[in-house]
Image (cartoon, coloured by chain):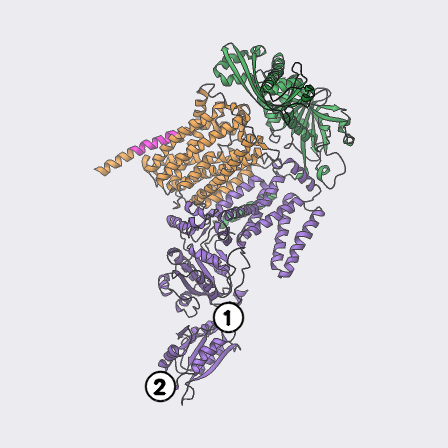
């Protein structure tokens, strides 16, 4: 019995290598994709899918030929998958998308609707949900965005992803939107995802050339742009920069930003937001007309001023705070108005209502698309100027005294 | 019958592994949508009650297999049939779980490898371990419990530090009332994975400490119920119910979403490892229950029928369903149409008979 | 080959065994010695006339083996007293009385005994003792003059420590016993000895602490030792293979050491130590996996540092097992897990490398094993060169030629270093073997294979027992009180002695699983009493143990 079992085992073991290692794929047989771009084909009927593939040799290999660190391959197809399969006509290696960090969709396509794309991204087991989504703005094609070269960081797609993270931390007009955010938001009734825009500053043709990197001021550069507002799966409009910041305020995603105020009879004063917190409440005083209350608390510090005020005086700071509050409220109101005009509940006020008053939501759910454009939103901003960096007065303070 | 015994601690680890096994990864209780975690918890409570019933049977016949005492209680033929039905049921479950595990591995990592090979590998290792006996399985469970624990901790830390948790996503609680939760409990949650521990009645006679064993079993249901519920909560608050509900393996997607500073990313293979380990124990326990049952019913030595039965499980796992949907659908139907017979009705009948038997033997002892 | 050769000789010896008793005919006896040793020139026969100038001196002779005995001792304590016997007593006494007189009054040696069997005479001579044969007496007197050259006690060559005793066992069993006895001055330290090997008659001694070691275990080991049938024992490994539990496994189930402090420590923990003459490596049993991860150094350093070191050793074991396998699985199956920038650099390295990662890993691991084997076997001076050639030249050249990726060299080097970090050499060999097993599994199935392999490995380790003690105890079965000295090493005042064994023995008793190996021998009980407290210098003329051996002719 024992020997028979051993024999069986031995035969099985011998069989295994014979049948081969099905899934083993050597790294040098993979074309690792850093970014995916999806455009409409020129005849507007098919998808044109572009893959930014990392050429590892050019990045850290010893056998580099001085080429570009990434290459963009694209193919057309009726579906994204079909186009992907067709890319194999151009690429000698297995297109592997697990490391794709960005997905760029052209504006044209976004206006047509992105549900097909989102399903592909959602379903695929290789593409990670943490990939960031962008909409190519200002007539740039997704293909162009992927083709751009960047001076810092050799893989443009990653550079772009890093730009998103950096600017959302530093300026607050964008925040990283990943695939799963889009999926969730599409499904919220009367709402839609918001997706960062990206455009090319400078010449579209120059940005893809290696010569682009031979000048100190690049001929073209990829830039994070304003936020696109969707309703359902369709792009409806773009926010302005101020509205984008306002959006981040309302959603409570803001990390840092700067606020410029011009108090009366004083010069411009610039404050930095160091920390902020937003909470949204839905008030149901009148059951048929819910009121949304957005509460913002912010901590700021004075960074720059063209004024002679004395920051040692708490009263002065309080005055500043009033201006700041006004400024923040202005930005938030701008974006809420815009969203209401587009009738897209990008702030997910509906969900807030659902979470806070689940019973009420059931009755209001059906008419939310009528309710939302008229929804009354109240802002309650409470900001505190915490410090004024290294000086408490401007150098002009003494100048003024004399 | 083997004379090997294992301790309550090892029994506990086997139970935990068994319950977490596949339940951790598959779409558990998502019929209740956001309230899946409540469904899991209620399933757990029902499971504990069921377990008490099984434990009662065990304490009534502490050193007999269910296939043996069913013959005492219901006579030679009916009892034999009940026992046989159970062993067939366990075989079926074993092959289903084999398929489950194979499909997950197939879907997540080994996309090109034939399913047959994946399942064969799994079955080979199961046979290898079971050949060494239940005691080795129990001790292995204890060590692998630590491995799973470490992996679980890693995943937990990963999810916490990547800041993707948003607990508002499980709100509002019970927005659609208790109806969907009850339905989910009825259709899935008490049987899977809690009712499934019925197969441990085949193993409990090997416990070396009767009282502690029973207590530890209850504890394990509590613990694994909590873990499962917490997992569901985490999954939904990371992915949102919209994605989680449609996912075939939500935990896998959830962990794939977690990344720290671009360095630690795509740790979903850890989930696959947990699943393989858990699934291994699930199949092993089911399969062992079936083998020991058949060896008792047909009076064939345990090690002799191990291999033929392994082949049966292997091949039936491949013929059980042609597609994943069919597999899931069949499984789902079986779960609330046939399984209750084995989890509730037959045990209840056995319990009643055991009560009568006990009363009668006491009376006999009295007179 | 050795066994084959020696079997022929043993046959011849048996034939010449026509007369087993000593007779009074001195000349015949001496002729027989010369004949049986094949006129070997190193047998010295010194004729003495007892009683000197008396009228009829009693003829006598001493026989010893030149190379094995201590000449000084023979001259001073055997020949000199024999020459100075009082003539009148020699004259007056009958032979029996004379023998007694010599034994009790003349020989100024601690170790003397009277023998009657011829085989004992030969055995004594071959062990280096001196045999006195007297005309007309059917007895011989054996004086313990064993000596000869042994290696001096040096520093251990394996199992090194920074802090701790620096002596090590040598090839002489009596020296080894003395090294242990010097550490444990307790009457409870019991010693049993026997001779194993029908040709070599190797001294094998079993030491244990009475009252600390499990009597059942001691009995079991005694039985297994007695059941050994072999011509020659040249190393303790021979015994190890005979007495270990019969499980097919690469894992060592018997611990060996050349450090007396380790042996003493294990004795105190209730284990049994088996010493074999002719090798510095003593066996310690039963053993568990955790023991192979312990170094004597652990007890010499602060406990927190020891815990760290032990954890590092466990990590090393995992690296040794899984290092190349995980690398292969990551690069060929799960590339999505590799951090992107690392992936880019890996891809650049792999560009132009002809082999798949799996083949590459196998090649490098095999090369590494070759290098190690070469380095170990070469004379020490050249061994250095081999490692330089291997590490620097081969490693670098292979990378520069683009045959192997640099990262592969790093992985292989890492597993190599990890294997050296294990305190026990034979465990690291087992680990090296399993590394290939995991490599194959991962080459076929990626992490799926590794996971299944891991399950099977753990199940395998769980199924091993060393003299009834589960190999993975105290982890599984979990013994809480033994955790103080398993992965952790809590301060010594917290665990008292015997942390590991006593508890795993309890477990063993609970499950009732001391598996008797082979046929049980029934005469063990009486031997215990007869062997009580032998002083550890020489057991050469212990009739009991030899009888026990010779009675059963059946081979294993």
Task: Please tell me the numbered disc located at residue A9.
Answer: none
Q: Write down which chain is painted orange.
A: B
- Along the line of sight, which residue is nearer the eye, A145 or A36? A145
Label 1 element class: helix
Magenta span covers which residues?
A: B344-355
Q: Write down which chain is painted purple.
A: C
Q: Residues within 10 Å of mark 1 (few under 14, many from 20)?
A: few
Q: Name the residue under label 2.
A: C92
Quadrant where the C terminus of chain B is found in the figure: top left
Label 2 element class: helix
Q: Is residue A342 left or right of residue B46?
A: right
User: Is residue C522 positioned above or below C503 on the image?
Assistant: below
Q: Write down which chain is painted green.
A: A
Which secondary structure type mostly characterizes the magenta part of the structure? helix
Taking the magenta stretch, the answer to whether it contains residue B353 is yes
On the question of residue C197 being in view, the answer is no
- Along the line of sight, which residue is nearer the eye, B354 or B85? B354
Q: Residues within 10 Å of mark 2 (few under 14, many from 20)?
A: few
Residue A321, x across and y down, in percent: 60, 18
Going from N to C along the chain, the mark reached first, 2 or 1, is 1
Chain on which label 1 sits:
C
Q: How far apart are marks 2 and 1 (CA)?
A: 45 Å
Q: Mark 1 points at which residue?
A: C9
User: Is residue A222 positioned above or below B286 on the image?
Assistant: above
Res. C156 image quadrant: bottom right
Residue C62, x across and y down, in percent: 45, 79
Taking the magenta stretch, the answer to whether it contains residue C227 is no
């Amino acid at each position: 019995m024992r020997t028979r079992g051993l024999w069986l085992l031995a035969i099985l073991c011998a069989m295994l290598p014979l049948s081969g290692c099905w899934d083993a794929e050597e790294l040098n047989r993979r074309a690792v994709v850093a970014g995916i771009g999806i455009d409409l084909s020129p005849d507007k009927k098919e998808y044109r899918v572009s893959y930014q593939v990392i050429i590892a040799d050019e990045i850290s290999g010893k056998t580099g030929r001085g080429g570009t660190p990434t290459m963009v391959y694209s193919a057309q197809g009726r579906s994204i998958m079909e186009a992907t399969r067709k890319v194999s006509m151009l690429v000698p290696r297995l297109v592997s998308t697990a490391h794709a960090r960005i997905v760029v969709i052209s504006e044209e396509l976004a206006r047509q609707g992105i549900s097909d794309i989102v399903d592909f991204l959602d379903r695929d087991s290789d593409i990670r949900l943490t990939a960031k989504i962008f909409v190519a703005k200002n007539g740039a094609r997704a293909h162009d965005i992927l083709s751009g070269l960047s001076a810092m960081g050799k893989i443009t797609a990653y550079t772009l992803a890093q730009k998103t993270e950096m600017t959302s931390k530093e300026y607050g007009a964008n925040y990283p939107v990943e695939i799963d955010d889009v999926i969730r938001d599409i499904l919220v009734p009367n709402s839609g995802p918001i997706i960062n825009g990206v455009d090319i500053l400078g010449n579209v043709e120059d940005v893809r050339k290696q010569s682009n990197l031979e000048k100190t001021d690049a001929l073209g550069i990829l830039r994070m742009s304003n936020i696109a507002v969707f309703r359902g799966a369709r792009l409806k409009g773009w926010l302005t920069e101020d509205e984008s910041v306002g959006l981040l305020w309302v959603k409570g995603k803001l990390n840092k930003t700067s606020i410029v105020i011009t108090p009366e009879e004083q010069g411009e004063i610039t404050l930095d937001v160091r920390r902020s917190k937003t909470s949204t409440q839905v008030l149901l005083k009148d059951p048929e007309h819910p009121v949304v209350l957005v509460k913002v608390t912010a901590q700021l510090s004075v960074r720059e001023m063209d004024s002679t005020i004395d920051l040692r005086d708490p009263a002065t700071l309080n005055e500043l705070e009033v201006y700041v509050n006004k400024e923040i409220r202005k930005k938030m109101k701008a974006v809420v108005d815009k969203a209401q005009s587009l009738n897209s509940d990008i702030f997910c006020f509906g969900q807030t209502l659902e979470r806070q008053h689940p019973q009420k939501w059931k009755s209001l759910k059906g008419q939310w698309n009528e309710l939302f454009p008229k929804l009354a939103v109240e802002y309650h901003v409470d900001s505190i100027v915490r410090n004024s960096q290294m000086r408490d007065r401007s150098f002009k303070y003494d100048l003024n005294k004399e | 019958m083997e004379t090997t015994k294992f301790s309550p601690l090892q029994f506990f680890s086997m139970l935990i592994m068994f319950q977490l096994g596949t339940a951790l990864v598959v779409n558990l209780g998502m019929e209740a949508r956001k309230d899946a975690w409540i469904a899991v918890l209620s399933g757990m409570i029902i499971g504990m009650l069921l377990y008490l019933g099984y434990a009662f049977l065990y304490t009534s016949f502490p050193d007999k297999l269910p296939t043996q005492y069913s013959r005492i209680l219901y006579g030679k033929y009916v009892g034999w049939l009940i026992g046989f039905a159970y062993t067939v049921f366990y075989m079926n479950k074993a092959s289903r779980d084999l398929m489950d595990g194979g499909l997950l591995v197939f879907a997540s990592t080994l996309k090109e490898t034939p399913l047959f090979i994946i399942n064969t590998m799994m079955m080979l290792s199961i046979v290898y371990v079971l050949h060494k006996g239940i005691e080795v399985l129990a001790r292995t469970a204890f060590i692998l419990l630590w491995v799973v624990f470490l992996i679980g901790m890693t995943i937990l830390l990963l999810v916490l530090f990547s800041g993707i948790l948003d607990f508002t996503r499980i709100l509002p609680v019970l927005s659609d009332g208790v109806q969907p939760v009850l339905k989910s409990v009825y259709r899935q949650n008490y049987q899977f994975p809690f009712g499934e521990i019925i197969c441990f009645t085949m193993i409990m006679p090997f416990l070396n400490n009767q009282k502690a064993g029973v207590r530890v079993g209850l504890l394990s249901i509590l613990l694994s119920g909590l873990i499962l519920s917490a997992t569901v909560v985490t999954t939904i608050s990371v992915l949102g119910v919209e994605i989680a509900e449609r996912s075939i393996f939500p935990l896998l997607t959830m962990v794939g979403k977690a990344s720290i500073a671009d360095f630690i990313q795509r740790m979903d293979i850890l989930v696959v490892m947990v699943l393989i380990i858990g699934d291994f124990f699930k199949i092993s326990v089911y399969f062992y229950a079936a083998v020991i049952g058949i060896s008792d019913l047909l009076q064939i030595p345990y090690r002799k029928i191990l291999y033929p039965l392994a082949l049966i499980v292997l091949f039936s796992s491949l013929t059980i369903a042609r597609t994943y949907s069919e597999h899931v659908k069949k499984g789902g139907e079986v779960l609330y149409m046939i399984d209750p017979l084995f989890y509730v009705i037959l045990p209840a009948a056995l319990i009643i008979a055991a009560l009568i038997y006990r009363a009668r033997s006491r009376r006999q002892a009295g007179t | 080959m050795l066994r084959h050769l020696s079997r022929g000789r043993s046959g011849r010896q048996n034939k010449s065994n026509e007369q087993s008793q000593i007779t009074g005919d001195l000349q015949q006896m001496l002729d027989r010695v010369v004949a049986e040793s094949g006129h070997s020139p190193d047998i010295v026969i010194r004729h003495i006339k007892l009683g000197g100038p008396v009228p009829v001196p009693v003829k006598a002779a001493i026989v010893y083996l030149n190379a094995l005995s201590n000449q000084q001792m023979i001259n001073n304590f055997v020949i000199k007293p024999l020459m100075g016997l009082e003539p009148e007593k020699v004259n007056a006494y009958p032979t029996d009385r004379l023998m007694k007189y010599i034994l009790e009054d003349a020989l100024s040696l601690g170790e003397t005994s009277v023998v009657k069997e011829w085989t004992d005479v030969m055995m004594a001579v071959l062990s280096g003792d001196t045999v006195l044969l007297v005309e007309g007496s059917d007895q011989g007197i054996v004086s313990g003059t064993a000596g000869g050259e042994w290696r001096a006690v040096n520093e251990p060559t394996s199992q090194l420590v920074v802090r701790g005793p620096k002596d090590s066992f040598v090839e002489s069993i009596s020296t080894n016993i003395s090294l242990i006895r010097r550490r444990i001055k307790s009457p409870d330290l019991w010693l049993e000895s026997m001779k194993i090997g029908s040709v070599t008659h190797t001294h094998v001694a079993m030491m244990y602490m009475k009252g600390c070691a499990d009597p059942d275990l001691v009995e079991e080991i005694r039985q297994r030792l007695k059941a050994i049938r072999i011509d020659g024992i040249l190393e303790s490994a021979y015994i190890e293979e005979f007495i270990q539990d019969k499980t097919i496994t690469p894992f060592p189930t018997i611990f060996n050491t050349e450090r007396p402090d380790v042996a003493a420590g294990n004795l105190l923990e209730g284990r049994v130590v088996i010493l074999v003459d002719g090798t510095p490596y003593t066996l310690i049993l039963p053993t568990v996996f955790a023991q192979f991860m312990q170094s004597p150094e652990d007890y010499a350093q602060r406990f927190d540092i020891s815990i760290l070191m032990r954890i590092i050793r466990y990590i090393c074991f995992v690296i040794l097992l899984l290092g190349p396998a995980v690398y292969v699985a990551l690069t060929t199956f799960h590339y999505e897990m590799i951090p992107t920038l690392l992936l880019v650099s890996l891809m650049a390295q792999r560009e132009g490398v002809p082999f798949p990662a799996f083949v590459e890993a196998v090649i490098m691991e095999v090369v590494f094993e070759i290098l190690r084997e070469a380095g170990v076997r070469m004379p020490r001076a050249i061994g250095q060169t081999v490692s330089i050639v291997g590490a620097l030249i081969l490693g670098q050249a292979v990378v520069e030629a683009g045959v192997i990726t640099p990262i592969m060299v790093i992985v292989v080097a890492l597993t190599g270093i990890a294997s050296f970090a294990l305190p026990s050499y034979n465990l690291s060999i087992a680990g090296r073997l399993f590394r290939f097993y995991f490599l194959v599994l991962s080459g076929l199935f990626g992490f799926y294979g590794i996971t299944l392999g891991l399950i099977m490995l753990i199940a395998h380790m769980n199924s091993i027992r060393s003299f009834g003690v589960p190999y993975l105890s105290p982890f599984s079965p979990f013994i809480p009180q033994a955790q103080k000295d398993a992965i952790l090493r809590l301060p010594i005042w917290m665990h008292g002695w015997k942390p590991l064994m006593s508890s795993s023995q309890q477990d063993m008793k609970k499950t009732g699983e001391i598996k008797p190996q082979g046929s049980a021998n029934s005469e063990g009980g009486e031997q215990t009493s007869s062997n009580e407290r032998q002083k550890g210098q020489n057991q050469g003329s212990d009739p009991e143990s030899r009888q026990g051996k010779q009675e059963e002719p059946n081979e294993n």
